[in-house]
Every structure is written in C-alpha cells, then in structure tokens.
Amino acid sequence: MRFSRTSKAIGIAAIAALALTACGGGGGTTSTGSSASGNPNAIITAYGNEPQKPLMPADTNEVFGGRIVDMLFQGLRSYDANGKPVNELAESIDTSDSQNYTIKIKTGTKFTNGEAITAKTFVDSWNFAALSTNLQSNGSFFQSIEGYADVSATTGSGDSAKPAPKAQTMSGLKVVDDSTFTVKLSQPESDFPLRLGYSAFYPIPSAAIKDPKTYGQKPVGNGPYKMGTDGWQHDKSVSLVKNSDYTGPREAKNGGITFTFYTDPGPAYTDVQGGTLDVTDVIPSNALQTYTTDLPDHNLNKSYAGDSTLNIPVYLDAFKGEEGKLRRQAISMAIDREQITKVIFNGTRIPAKEFTAPVLDGFDANIAGSDVLKFDAAKAADLWAQADKIKPWDNSKPLTIAYNTDGGNKEWVDAVANQLKTNLKINAEGKAYPKFATMLDDRISKKLTGLVRAGWQADYPSLYNFLGPVLATGASSNYEGYSNPEFDKLLQEGLGAKTVEDGAKKFNEAQAILFQDLPNLPLWNNAVQVGWSTNVSNVDTDWRGVILYYNIVKS
C-alpha cells in the first residue's frame, strides 16, 4: 500500500479530472448525513490489519500502516477528496525557476507532546528520512533534492549493499528562520509541491529521531487524531482519539477511530452486517454480487488511482535470460483478465492496459508492447514451448502465487492459477499468507518462491508515482529487484520535462521498456467497495480509494 511518490505528467488541470465516478458492479451510494445528527465523541470502528513496521511516516509504505499514519500527522499539504492539494502547515511554497523553492510554514503549531513545529523540524525530519543509515523505506522520495546522493550512498550491491553515506544532511535543505526553509533540487521539477502531501514528507518530533523504534510503537503526531489510551495492541487493534488542538481541513467529526485487525475479510463483513464493526473497505469476493442488497444504502463502489499486478522476482532462475522473458510473456497472455474481472469481481475491476491508472493525465492504452496484456491461450502455449526448448520447465514443483488472505485475494489467485494450469499445462497454485505484513517481509528479504500479488495505491496523482517508486533501480517499493538503466534514464527525463505533455511522453516511453522486460504483469485497475453499518453515516472515499475516516458520523 500505500501509497506506498512524482510526475511532470500531472498538474493542477489533471487533478481536477480526478473526481472519480462510480463504476459498474455495485452501488454508487454515499452516505451524506451531517455531523449535527451524530455524537461528536463516538468512536468509529474500522477494518484494519497489523502494520508491517513501527508507525514512522518515512518508514511506512503499505496501506494498513499508511491509513493510521495519515490520521496521526499533518504535513505541509494534504489532498482533498478529489486529489487537489490543500495547504495545511504550509503558509506558502514559492519558486521562480522550479528548482529553488522557499517554503514558509504556519507559526505556533505543535506536536501533541507540546514540542513546537518549526522550519528546522522539517529539515531535520527530511534529512533523517533520507539518510541511508536510518533505513527508512521512503527515503528515496527525497532523491530530487540536491545532496541526496551523498546521504543515501551505499557500498556493495544487491543483498550485500550497506549504508555508507558521505554526508549526514542534504546540501539542498537550508533553514532561513523559524518559519522558513529553502529547498534546492538537482534539476527543475515544477511538480515538486504536488508531492508534499505524501507521508514521507511529514514532520516528526525530536524523540522520533533519537529513538525511532520506541517512538514508532506509540507515535506522537500533529494530525486530526492522536494515539488513544489503548494504543497499538499488536495483532489486535490501534486506537486513535480526536486531537482537539488540530486545525486544518481534516478536522474529525467523531471522537476517534479504532482500527480492528482482521486476517480474513469474511468475519469483518459479518461484523458490519451485525453492527459490531462500523466500516470495511475490503468486501469478500463471495459478497461482491450481494453487498449492495446486504447493506442497502450503506455501500459504495468507486474507481480510484490504484492497480493490481503479479510481480516476478528477478532472482528466480526460471525467469532470467531469454527463457525467462518468454515465460513472463506466456504467463501474461495465459491470463484472461476480462473473465476474472467479470466473474470473480462482478465487474468492479477494469482489465489493465498499461502500468498506471486510467484516471491519471497522460494515461495511454496503446503503448508499444501492450498487446502482451491481451488473452491469447494459443500464443501463450507457443511462447512457453519456446522457453522449454531453451531449458525445460521443472513441473515437479508448483509455480506459486503468493497472496495475503486479509485482502480478499484467494478467489482471483485461484482463478489465475487454474488458467495457468489449463493454458500452459503446468502445476500452479496459490501460496497463502494470513497477513499482508508477513508477505511483505518475504518480498523485502527476497524469500519468494514464485510470483507474488501486488498492488499500488497512489500517494499523489501522477504517472511517475506508479513507475518510479515501484520499478526504478533501488526504489523504496522495488522489492523484487528490477533494474534497467534505460528505464531509469527516461524517468529522470520525464521528471525534468518542461510541460505535462512532454513528461507524459517520456514516462510512456519508459513503459514501453517495461512491456519488453515485464518485471511485473499489470492485471486490472481498481475500484474500492465499501460497506458500513447502520450506526454510521457520511461515509465516502477519496481519489486514492481511502476512506475519509475523519468525516464519518456515528449516532
């Protein structure tokens, strides 16, 4: 998740186009009750799962931890429901050349422990996040800032790489006074301010920098909520309560949120029907045809900037070289995306046409090489046979597809496995993980035995956000280890492009390389289905498919 990031292909005009509409296969209902009719002290209970890591903003890049971090912190900016950036702590963000920025922050703001938030807070927080020895997952989000290469330097490569920074702070960050700091980028990038609502850029208090592990268990933030008395009960729940000192566009209309952790969406769905859970954004596959009638006037189905993929680790011998290239193509063409989106997802997904999302400016359904996403069983079998001539496939062991059961993935993974069995004549099966965090740990430590389901929920509205953080060499969420210098070069050229259109062209040229290499297989673009109990109202999601928890009203 989650969200787990920039693009010249997206500007303010594009953000306006992100007012997402309901798609087929479910109700478009959104509850619009007013806060006056609810109890402002009531606690909302919501679907969640155990976060993978301590709740440090720069180290959280999966959806379950991300939804908590976003409620605990306030950054320079946030995004409204349609993806438009809105200033929060930023008083102004100015530039004359798109390379040198002057950022003024609002004065008098504090963390919930009373520590003042100043320009130095931001500079210290960003330097901490970028410094390689701090091992923050989202450190690469600062790569545009001058001096990042020095603080992020490593020795060795691959699994043997170790942090070896040449400097402790980025030369491109300077504190001017308590309310002003400057940012110098390595090249002009006019959409830099667009990124600043993402969680990697949140400020953190001094205690977090001194002892991040301890702090991450009970973080102190400055957002619409703060940690509740019960805090983080591992593998059970996280309790948040309203932060009465917060002033900003996300002021809570309820008294708090308790994220209850489930390893299976089925019981959560039953709990929503019974009124013991207020809201869930993971509907079991077997309820996709009935949730609109099971929860009449308490459901929505809404497109968002997100996708689902099958990722193929580069370290697996069977997928290396020319043999591996043929097998990647064969697997992609052996999957009938149309059938799965209709039968398994009841029309609530759209078969993928490329590596980003249709709601983004610059999306192109006709990129060179994208024919590999079209179902063609005969061509898939032929490609597999060509690979077998190079080196026969070992069918004594199944081709596994790793997936997490807490995300409602079993049915579609089983369907893909069956299609691979039928169309490629190989043994294929799902490999279930009860928790997303555990599966992510295996991805990071490169312990996968086969394919792995993955997905991307946009951090901010951009084409680059679906490419760079996931597939650029060494990027924060490039867990399977893909690397192609030409792809990286085109991404950088897109970032430095002078116009939105020119940036999009470069990013789509980069996608043409991905269609040759197929480090992952785009499956479908997503819509989020949400169900809620009769106890709550005013439920909606934003442009990323994330529930607007702070707007929920409870009786």
Image (cartoon, rainbow, N blue to C red):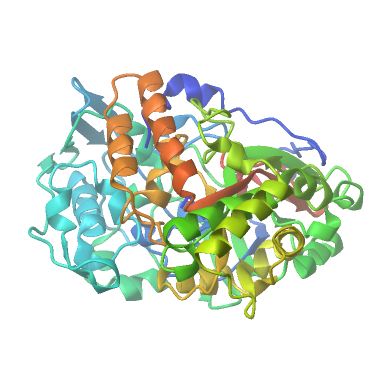
* Residue 8 occupies quadrant: top left
The residue depicted at 24 percent of the width and 73 percent of the height is: 160
* Residue 400 occupies quadrant: bottom right
Q: Position of residue 477 (x, y in %)?
A: 41, 57
Report the residue that reaches farthest toward the right: 293
* Residue 153 occupies quadrant: bottom left
Q: Is residue 386 above or below residue 106?
A: below
User: Does residue 372 appear anywhere in the picture?
Assistant: yes
* In this picture, residue 186 sits left or right of residue 456: left
* In this picture, residue 49 sits left or right of residue 514: right
Report the residue that reaches farthest toward the bottom: 396
Q: Position of residue 301 (x, y in %)?
A: 75, 41
Name the residue nearer the viewer: 506 or 172: 506
Q: Position of residue 54 (x, y in %)?
A: 41, 70
The residue depicted at 48 percent of the width and 36 percent of the height is: 79
Q: Position of residue 433 (x, y in %)?
A: 62, 74
* In this picture, residue 504 sits left or right of residue 270: left
Report the residue that reaches farthest toward the front: 389
The residue depicted at 38 percent of the width and 56 percent of the height is: 482
Name the residue nearer the viewer: 241 or 371: 371
The residue depicted at 23 percent of the width and 55 percent of the height is: 130
* In this picture, residue 10 sits left or right of residue 117: right
Name the residue nearer the viewer: 384 or 317: 384
User: Does residue 536 appear anywhere in the picture?
Assistant: no
Q: Is residue 21 above or below residue 339?
A: above
Name the residue nearer the viewer: 67 or 137: 137
